[in-house]
Amino acid sequence: MENNHQDWSRRNFIASVTAAGAAIMFNPFVSWASNEYNPRIAAIVAKTIGVDTHNHIDVPLNGEELSGSKIDLYGELKKSGLSAICMTFAVDYQQLINPGDAYKRFINGLDAMDNVLKSNNMKRSLNFKDLQFAHKKKIPTVIQSVEGGHFLEGKLERLEEAYSRGLRHLGLLHDNDASVPLGDIFTKPAQWGGLTSLGSDVIKECNKLGILVDLAHCTNETVNAALKVTTKPVLISHTGLDTQLGQNPKMAQMMLPRLISKEQAKIVASSGGVIGVWTHLADTPLEYAQNVRALVDVIGVDHVCIGTDTKMTPPYRSADNKKNNGQRDNNGPKKQNATPKGTNETWQNQNGGFLYTVVDSMLKVGFNEDEIVKIGGGNFCRIFDSATAVSK
């Protein structure tokens, strides 16, 4: 891992993602699964290259705190049943005041994530073959992501530097505009006419280098413009259908601008893209599976994946945040005295790791094993393979 591999044939790719063991006792991947689970669920998890396409790992973003605290990323990933997460962070939750602030936080974040991976004896996967190798060896892995292109500060050449540090998944936009904007954000008034010229150049450069483009947080106009520019399939890593609003009216009202319409989802799917369903607005695993089903019914099983927008490990608290009762971390505001829960504790009274729980519920809403393998990671792997393939 963290090196280049030759491209795969499509036949080998499909076979590697979908092939199942003849029986659980002979399944070579079954040791990935815990013995405490129903054998059918354990077998499905074992043969799935399970990927959460949007998972935050909190790390310090200032130089003084780079040693950080030890976190058990390896253990939490093994418990979850996932093979990998797209390990992301954002630099724009605290105000970016001075030129260079975004870049400095980005580099510090990568340095901190290097430390996390080293302490957990883990490596980044740079392409699909790396993911397949890690899954075969039953070693959890990560795909390096960042949410928002703020670190570029108008300098396109920084993408190549980020690539050399292992970045393979770029969220084009986040909550706040970059100093040189890339496009309109769906939670802010539109002011750039969709995709900016820099945004267009960034997508082209990502296509050239081999970085997957994630259009979460983009307005419909930005997405549609991006689809005209990109030569590779795109991802919208974390959202949900705007018809699936859950049981909490206040939460639904807050989340509605972040959801996707059926019409827009079809546009993304028709371009070959994949859309991740987050766990927000689903109070139970069964409700989450129903949200996945609703999107599949609109765009088909080949264009849906999992993108929880949760945290695999506990949120990092800087010294200042601890003094302020932890009301804010580097991934946004927190309620006073709230106890953040990790991905493996997404739902109240959740019994077992995340993917095991989700597979159980997906079976209950009528998905078959092949469909679960696709949604659980196969669809993401397909576009990740395409996006990271670089012509020699």
Image: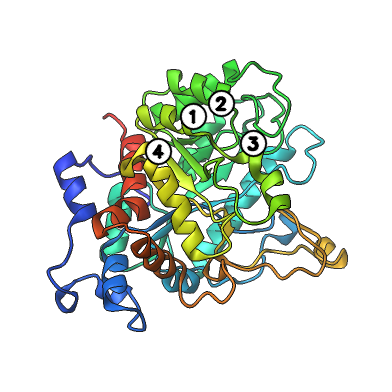
Q: Which of marks 2 and 1 is in front?
A: 1
Label 4 vs label 2, nearer the camera: 4
* Mark 2: few/some/many CA within 10 Å (<14, 14-19, 20+): many
Q: Distance between the residues labelled 4 and 3?
A: 36 Å
Asked if one can make out residue 9 in the rendered structure from this viewpoint, the answer is no
* Element type at mark 3: helix
Helix, strand or loop at mark 2? helix
The residue indicated by pointer 1 is 264
Residue 233, position as x, y percentages in the image: 37, 32
Asked if marks 4 and 2 touch (Cβ < 8 Å), the reply is no
Label 4, label 2: how far apart the Cα atoms are: 17 Å
- Distance from label 1 to label 3 (Cα)? 29 Å
Q: Is residue 155 left or right of residue 135?
A: right
In which image quadrant can residue 141 be found? bottom left
Q: In this view, does 257 lie to the left or right of 364?
A: right
Of residues 317 and 348, the one drawn nearer to the viewer in this rendering: 348
Other residues around mark 1 within 10 Å, as few (<14) / some (14–19) / many (≥20):
some
The residues tagged by marks 3 and 2 sit, at their Cα atoms, a distance apart of 24 Å
Q: Which amino acid does label 3 sit on?
A: Phe
Q: According to the image, label 2 marks what residue?
A: 220
Residue bearing the label numbered 3: 151
